[in-house]
Amino acid sequence: MLESKRVSNLYQSIYNGDPWLEVTLENTLKNVTAAQAYRKINPRLNTIWEIVNHLIQWRRNILRRVQGETVTTPDHNYFVPVLDSSEAAWEQSLQSLAKSQELWNVFLDTFDDGNFEKIYPTNNHTYYEHIHGIIQHDVYHLGQIVILKKLL
């Protein structure tokens, strides 16, 4: 099996498959309402919604990088307050997360394994490190979401 296929399977499992860690983004977020996602448990912590939006933006950032684009990360690191706390806006965030997964699936399905060794010029990390990094990033924040959801 190609490495890109193994990586794709791993990334897909974390979103809505059967990962080793036994929780997925889709199942964890399935019954979260807009009010719950928007709720600030502690003033020093991000909300579930802020984390979801952060995930979406970082997924887009890294995808653009491994497609050859140079991307500048904003100072706020994609953690911005949610301005519209409606159910429709929450559903839009969930749909954007699903769309980001679709874009990654298409990318990885057509990825040439020889490109894993390419170097991203601004930080000298390989595309392999970037792709595995975004998977690790998703898992890290999935853990935060699981904890915040338990505190609701």
Image: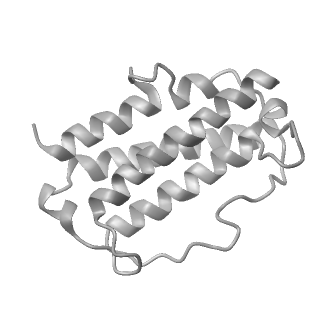
- The colour mode here is one colour
With respect to residue 133, does 90 lie above or below?
Answer: above
User: What x and y, as percent, mark residue 10?
Assistant: 32, 35
Quadrant of the rendered structure where residue 81 is? bottom right
Q: Determine whether, in the image, residue 106 is placed left or right of residue 74.
A: left
The image quadrant where one finds the N terminus is top left
Q: Residue at x 44, y 43 (%)?
A: 101
Q: Determine whether, in the image, residue 73 is placed left or right of residue 85.
A: left
Q: Residue furthest right?
A: 43
With respect to residue 33, does 47 lie above or below?
Answer: below
User: What x and y, as percent, mark residue 19?
Assistant: 39, 24
User: What x and y, as percent, mark residue 91?
Assistant: 68, 37
Q: Residue at x 80, y 24 (%)?
A: 151
The image quadrant where one finds the C terminus is top right
- How many numbered circles does the render carry? 0
Quadrant of the rendered structure where residue 34 is? top right
User: What x and y, as percent, mark residue 14?
Assistant: 43, 32
Q: Determine whether, in the image, residue 88 is placed left or right of residue 16.
A: right
Q: Residue at x 40, y 43 (%)?
A: 102
